[in-house]
Amino acid sequence: MSVLVSLIVALGMLVIVPLGLRLLETSGAPPSSALRALRRLWLAPAALG
């Protein structure tokens, strides 16, 4: 059961959260590539933990 929960959480961190963060960017300009890379590095430990 805990494996299933871990898979669901990992899926949420890797797919759902980044999609939601894209919706918050309302300025119309895409974020810089450095910011995008830092965002991925921030989410990786949470998805693996």
Image (cartoon, grey):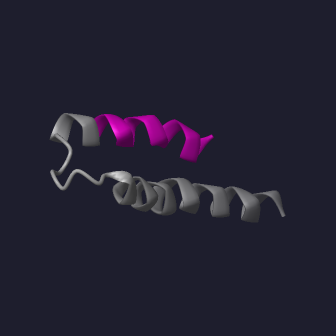
Residue 15: percent from the left, percent from the top? 46, 62
Relative side of 9 to 16, left or right: right
What is the chief secondary structure element of the magenta stretch? helix
Residue 34: percent from the left, percent from the top? 20, 34
Q: Is residue 39 magenta?
A: yes
Observer-nearest residue: 23 or 37?
23
Residue 18: percent from the left, percent from the top? 41, 55
Residue 1: percent from the left, percent from the top? 84, 64
Q: Is residue 35 magenta?
A: no
Q: How many marks?
A: 0
Residue drawn at the location 74% of the way across and 65% of the way down:
4
Relative side of 11 to 34, left or right: right
**What are the residue bounds of the magenta stretch?**
37-49
Above-or-below relation of 30 to 11: above
Relative side of 47 to 28, left or right: right
Residue drawn at the location 34% of the way across and 57% of the way down:
22
What is the quadrant of the C terminus in the image? top right
Residue drawn at the location 41% of the way across and 53% of the way down:
21
User: Quick one: which residue is furthest to the front in this view?
Assistant: 27
